[in-house]
Amino acid sequence: MSAELELENHPSTKQPVETTRKTGAEVFIETLKEQDVDIIFGYPGGAVLPLYDALYRNPIKHILARHEQGAIHAAEGYARVTGRPGVVIATSGPGATNLVTGITDAMMDSLPLVVFTGQVATTVVGTDAFQEADIVGITQPITKHNYQIKDVQDIPRIIKEAFHIANTGRKGPVVVDFPKNIANALFDAASYKDEPINLPGYQPTIRPNFLQIKKAIELIQKAKKPIVLAGAGILAANAKLEFNQFIEKYQLPVVNTLLGLGTIENDHALFYGMAGMHGTYASNMGISEADVLINIGSRFDDRLTGNLSKFAPSAKIIHIDIDPAEIGKNVPTDVPIVSDAKEALQALLKQEFEVEDHTEWVTTLNTWREKYPYWYEVDEEGTLLPQQILQHVNDLTKGEAIVTTDVGQHQMFAAQYFSFKKDHRWVTSGGLGTMGFGFPAAIGAQFAFPDEVVVAIVGDAGFQMTLQELGLLQEFDLPVKIIMLNNACLGMVRQWQQSFYNERYSSSLMPVQPDFVKLAEAYNVKGIVIDDAKTAKQQLAEAFAYDGPVLIDCRVKQLELVTPMVAPGAGLNEMIGVEK
């Protein structure tokens, strides 16, 4: 008799199910359905068995990741491309603590997640019971809010509030800690009153102050050298249409943050590239020479600004952000506007005003863009370069693929050489810089959009942190294409050691690697090696034509550098590696 048949005929599966009274776990599942949850990423354990038993009897699609970190990064990928909260379940203790990196990552990058962690029974909380961890205390600094459910009657209210908080204002993760005895407790439906969400202490400002909008317009009207810094807040607000209408109406030059890529098409006449440490010369010089800088939906991250004392020294700053804590935090602001990006842009578009002639300024920016593009030197011996691979992939996908990345050199090369035509197609770890993010994030994105082309750009080091999620490609036949830029080292760490530590490669080289093709085949995933620049384009075309997942091991030059670069302590106008 098979194991499946034995389980089916086991006496415990034949016991009648009590239907007249609902447990906390059953109410949990019902409330998730009311929130239109269509997929959950998770990993079961003792403390969440009641939740999983209820899930078995009241199905919502559940994806069993191979590690909790894989689950939460997949939920992040889902959240980034859909704009909807990613949902995660993990058990108490190590299950919950394995989520901490992903929770922090989502907090830094403003991704909506609702994370349910199991907890020991309330009767033994604080006794160091088996698999007990104070996940509420641990996650308090890295969540928008967190809860521990202490009364079964609070389950619907808390879950509704969690989804509301996660996906409104500045989006972010919310943790709900779920003690096992609360999940097993009986819910009194007769005494429960379903009331509207009432959170007096949580009232994010969505609409801009009209007087501040007028002040912003006054600065824009006088500007002779304006520049717009477009961040991920535009994408979170689904404001790409309004943003493009605004910049085209007043012919305002645009640069992107790393996470803001996709707010404007890369071939737009007013787009001058990504700004920051590995940004374009035109974008960084544009910020450095501007007289008015309009920041929409960016928090002035240090990788963007470089040396703050040298950042936009001649510019008046207009900062539009939904989080008031970000305005003035890093860069002094002349006109602060606390608002959702879409609401602020709509308010600006409603006002008719004249601006100065920017022709000379745009001509200067165009000259910089044409004279100092991203560049690399083709190796005379035919060594494969990461830039070549990414240019080929961009051409094959026509800039329309969903692209996820890990963190490091490959991430920067992808940001530089992919041309995004659509929004919500760029999925990367920005603020936290999480290795291991890219591959499971691609899985989450593929579940969200099964018919889209999803490409995971990873390094050989970061891929090995979450490669166990290959099991999901096998189980669900997800057609994710994994582009592994294999330089047998920790690429960005090695670059910094080469540039700033006299080439002392301390623990950054990885000469011993697995056979990645055999590894892929062990998971029933197609694997190929590309090591010749002459055949790379054809091999990639064949891989992308394959109807299924492919792991593509690209053996690239080890000592290649990401250029240009703003060195630590330098200003944006002090870039190195601008020219060949």
Image (cartoon, helix red, strand yellow):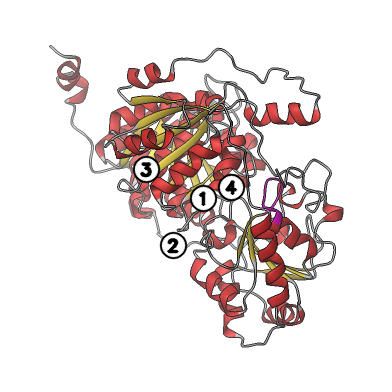
Of badges 2 and 3, nearer the viewer stands: 3
Of badges 2 and 4, nearer the viewer stands: 4
Query: What number of labels is visible?
Result: 4
State the residue in front, 496 or 304: 496
Neighbours of disc 1 within 10 Å: few (<14), some (14-19), many (20+): many
Q: Earlier in the sequence, mark 1 or mark 2?
A: 1
Neighbours of disc 4 within 10 Å: few (<14), some (14-19), many (20+): many
Q: Earlier in the sequence, mark 4 or mark 3?
A: 4
Helix, strand or loop at mark 3 = helix
Q: Position of residue 576 (x, y in %)?
A: 77, 44
Q: Is residue 216 left or right of residue 191?
A: right
Residue carrying label 1: 112
Q: Position of residue 245 (x, y in %)?
A: 53, 75
Q: Is residue 391 left or right of residue 374?
A: left
Label 2, label 3: how far apart the Cα atoms are: 36 Å
Q: Earlier in the sequence, mark 1 or mark 3?
A: 1
* Residue 416, numbered label: 4
- Can you say whether 189 is above or below 404 in the image? below
- Which residue is painted at 49% across and 44% down in the image? 391
Q: Position of residue 82 (x, y in %)?
A: 42, 53
